């Protein structure tokens, strides 16, 4: 295996390595200025809920995701995503909710830095009339500054009887929080 | 009695729509419970903590 090693001015180095397999391949760098994204600086995570929550009807409540599936950059703590790489992140969250008597409304939001920003998609449903489970999903492309910006998932269940944000012990986790960097800043 | 029921007891004219638009109740799942995060009702004043506490 052959490598080209570029040493830093004061310390560190980067190695460009060619695999020792037959054939000729070409990797072309674009004629643009920016940070090269490799797996090591592209955070990706997936968490899911492992316990029911019992929110108060009509109260916008932070959703807790207690179990990590993967978190390549350890960027999630206490159900809060705080990436340390600036860029645009594709985010997805879903919350399964239910009411013992009747679920009449359901909302889901991404809160950026503690605030429900109008520039970030959210979904609101009214006029429901169900005692079964209802799953809300939201997806959004969100810029994060790579230092202080953080993102959380909030939801609202409106209805009567005991309300729940639901988790499942099966593999088909219905209440999840996922994200991945798709473009650096 | 939860915070919505207390507010509704204080202001029976409020509707579910009010809680989707001019009033936001929030819980940060940090153990501090439900609270009024936004109150922009055009005519009704925001309830005080004391008013809510007195409703049993």
Image (cartoon, grey):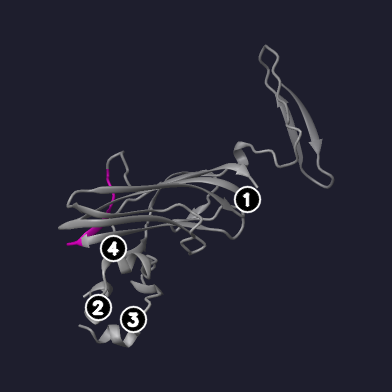
Q: In which quarter of the image is residue A154?
A: bottom left
Residue at the far top: name it: A22
Q: Which of marks 4 and 1 is nearer the N terminus?
A: 4
Circle 1 residues within 10 Å: few <14, some 14–19, many ≥20: some
Q: Which of marks 3 and 2 is nearer the N terminus?
A: 2
Determine whether, in the image, residue B7 is placed left or right of residue A27.
Answer: left
Q: Distance between the residues labelled 4 and 2?
A: 16 Å
Host chain of mark 4? A
Residues marked 4 and 2, same chain: no
- Between residues A66 and A149, which one lies in front from this camera angle? A149
**Tag 3–tag 2 contact (CB < 8 Å):** no
Circle 4 residues within 10 Å: few <14, some 14–19, many ≥20: many
Q: Name the residue under label 3.
A: B44
Q: Name the residue under label 1.
A: A86
Host chain of mark 2? B
Q: Name the residue under label 4.
A: A55
Write the start and end of the magenta stretch as one range: A160-169
Residues marked 3 and 2, same chain: yes
x 70%, y 14%: residue: A24
x 51%, y 56%: residue: A119
Instruction: Note whether A84 is above or below B5 in the view shown.
Output: above
**Tag 4–tag 3 contact (CB < 8 Å):** no
Residues marked 4 and 3, same chain: no
Circle 2 residues within 10 Å: few <14, some 14–19, many ≥20: some
Q: Name the residue under label 2.
A: B6
| Residue A134 seen in the figure | yes
Q: Which mark is residue A113?
A: none
Q: Which of marks 3 and 1 is in front?
A: 3
Q: Does the magenta stretch include residue B56?
A: no
Q: Which of marks 4 and 3 is in front?
A: 3
- Element at badge 3? loop
């Amino acid at each position: 295996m052959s490598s080209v090693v570029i040493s830093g001015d004061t310390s560190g180095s980067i190695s460009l390595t060619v695999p020792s397999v037959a054939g000729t391949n070409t990797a072309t760098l674009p004629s643009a200025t920016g940070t090269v994204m490799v797996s090591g600086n592209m955070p990706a995570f997936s968490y899911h809920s492992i316990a029911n929550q019992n929110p108060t009807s009509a109260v916008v409540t932070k959703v807790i995701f207690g179990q990590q599936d993967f978190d390549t950059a350890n960027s999630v703590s206490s159900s809060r995503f705080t990436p340390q790489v600036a860029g645009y992140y594709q985010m997805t969250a879903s919350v399964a909710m239910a009411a013992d008597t009747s679920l009449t409304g359901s909302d889901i939001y991404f809160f950026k830095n503690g605030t429900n920003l109008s520039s970030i998609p959210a979904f609101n449903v009214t006029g429901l009339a169900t005692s079964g489970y209802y799953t809300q999903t939201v997806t959004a492309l969100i810029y994060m500054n790579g230092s202080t910006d953080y993102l959380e998932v909030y939801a609202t269940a409106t209805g009567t009887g005991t309300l729940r944000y639901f988790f499942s012990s099966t593999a088909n986790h219905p209440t999840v929080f996922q994200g991945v960097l798709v473009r650096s800043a | 009695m939860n915070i919505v029921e207390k507010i509704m007891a204080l202001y029976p004219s409020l509707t579910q729509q009010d809680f989707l638009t001019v009033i936001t109740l929030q819980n940060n799942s940090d153990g501090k419970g439900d609270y009024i995060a936004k109150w922009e009702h055009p005519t009704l004043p925001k309830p005080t903590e004391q008013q809510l506490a007195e409703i049993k």
